[in-house]
Image: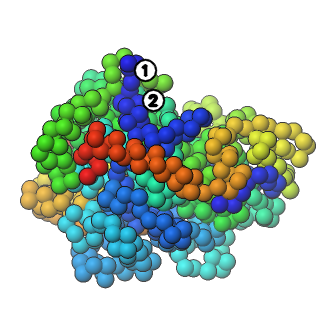
Amino acid sequence: MATRTLYDKLWDDHVVRTEADGTALLYIDRHLVHEVTSPQAFEGLRLAGRGLWRTNSILAVPDHNVPTTKQHRGNGTAGIEDPVAKIQIETLNQNCEDFAVEEFLMDDIRQGIVHVIGPEQGATLPGMTVVCGDSHTSTHGAFGALAHGIGTSEVEHVMATQCLIQKKMKNMRVSVQGKVGAGVTAKDIVLAIIGEIGTAGGTGCAIEFAGEAIRDLSIEGRMTVCNMAIEAGARAGMIAVDQTTIDYIEGRPFAPKGEEWSLAVEAWQHLVSDEGAEFDQEVCLDASKIEPQVTWGTSPEMVLPISATVPNPSDESDAVKSSGIQAALDYMGLTAGESIDTISVDKIFIGSCTNSRIEDMREAAQIAKGQTVASNIKLAMVVPGSGLVKQQAEEEGLDKIFIDAGFEWREPGCSMCLAMNADRLESGERCASTSNRNFEGRQGQGGRTHLVSPAMAAAAAIKGHFTDIRDLS
Amino acid sequence: MEKFTIHKGLLVPLDRSNIDTDAIIPKQYLKSVKKSGFGPTLFDDWRYKKAGEPGMDHSQREINQDFVLNQAQYQGASVLIARENFGCGSSREHAVWALTDYGIRSIIAPSYADIFFNNSFKNGLLPVVLGEDIVDQLFKEIDDGYELTIDLEQQKVITPSGEAFAFEVDAFKKHCMLNGLDDIGLTLQHADDIRAYEVKRKQEAPWLMA
Ligand code: SF4
């Protein structure tokens, strides 16, 4: 048999039928649902008099616009102040009740960001196809799964048919060879990759992340990398299965048990690209050259090492690119040539589906321990990715470390990643954020977002400006 | 879904690359549980002077005269032209609903983000891919009242001078657009295949079909 990539194998395992032009029906094993992109899909089903094809493939949770302060949580949705957000969450609850879909309600300890809770519950397994009406569904590829973000029409399509209409994407491999230096995290690796290939570099491709530096990552780190595959233009990112993957899944509530577990583990061993498998595109990075990264502009590809200076538009010969740099500098309120480590910030956000898992909390707490948030910081918030992450962090005393240093310790949700709830930037405010998008207005109209790792965000909180965490220890 | 066969309409130029879904429709409007009514808040941050909120009377807000969509000569535009990687960012279909609700029927750009591209076809919005040099030429040619004809059947974009540019489109997507077909109905015609797949899969990987 010909050699196949991991993506080829996942694809082949899920094709229900293929048309002459290559359009395929791809079977979906797991469908994750949240409040923002599902109401119109449920409504569509009702209008057409259709039901769900396989109810137990769906797991639902409200996350995007849940409040993150204690006083607004509890007692169901009663504490939500924003009437529109409240309707949206209540609509999800009602839809899940009407269609008998399993939902983790807002006050359930298992509630959290959809891309955190899927893996945490073992609802994301190797070899699965996973979809969700959210572009960061690529996160779940960290388990050797094929995970796509989809639009609302596709949400409805998967609900009604358990299939997605797809054409096969191209195979791309990004290898990060060698070992990263101290203080360099999964977030820095993926930002460096995006800096290298650009935000459209992976368009039309499924990216497999490989190489020693990727293998060395924990599952949490791998999720951070796959999470941002979409920021490199790829709808799906993935990493081959190994012992790290299997150890993480064992014993989780939705994971197979007993004899099925042994069968599954046996099957999962094959979820790697065959030796010699061909990729349409290959990119290699040298891990030892990656430094802690900071984005300076309004697109994730506008990223530089902490030791760099803000770029000068006149150094760019392409006129369209040059004016793009100038527009970004204007929006961000930065001057060409200034050192990145002198840029001071107003707010700190540690959270989002990129960096809100227990390892991220530990990484930030290690920097914050025994320190105090600088006086120019108006708000430094830590938002764990799920109720269970929050609980574990509290058992480890991380909440105390943050609170003692002057951070706010919040309830789980998407929060200031997209500012759909009350957590947001005011116009002109600058934020060191562990989220994944630095688009104009993403964290509030006129807000300025710099994407960094949790350690770098914590360090910026302590110093009041960006700083090289490698100098701290 | 509304059919798309031939469309003739006024072109509006949005000379930027990487136009993201947050710019197309800011997140505060995603709280709606409906598919309609997003037109007045399309490109909200660029179109109005101050941030808006859902439920506002948008016709009363102060508009940003510099923004191209607000300029007199582009009123009634139904074709939008932009630079590469249009629609990057989130999977929100609200971005497509905002464009169609505003009256845009087709977009022209050198490239699109994958999810946005797919979402467009599901809503009768035709994303046309033309080479960077052609897009550049169109940007330069645009004059007041510049109308393009987009012929999906022939896969051509035709300028007022009669110059025609061919474009590629996936055969299945084209078929659905030309006939206004609902893909759920089409897929359900293969329900037996889906059931057969499930039976096979249950034997191979029972833990997935529990
Ligand atoms: S945390 Fe941010 S990126 Fe992730 S799902 Fe929520 S809003 Fe989307």
Q: Is residue B105 left or right of residue A468?
A: right
- Under circle 2, the secondary element is strand
Tag 1–tag 2 contact (CB < 8 Å): yes
Q: Which residue is mark 1?
A: A278
Q: Is residue B111 left or right of residue A435?
A: right
Against A253, is A174 above or below?
above
Q: Amino acid at mark 1?
A: Glu
Residue B151 visible in image: yes
Horizontal and vertical percent for residue A55? 35, 61
- Under circle 1, the secondary element is loop
Task: Tell me the colour scheme of the image.
Answer: rainbow
Q: Amino acid at mark 2?
A: Asn
Horizontal and vertical percent for residue A327? 58, 48
Q: Which residue is mark 2?
A: A171
Chain identifier of the residue bearing label 2 in the image: A
> Which residue is farthest right?
B161
- Separation of residues labelled 1 and 2 (CA atoms): 8 Å
For residue B9, which numbered disc appears in the image? none
Decide: few, some or many residues near mark 1? Use Cα within 10 Å; few <14, some 14-19, many ≥20.
Answer: some
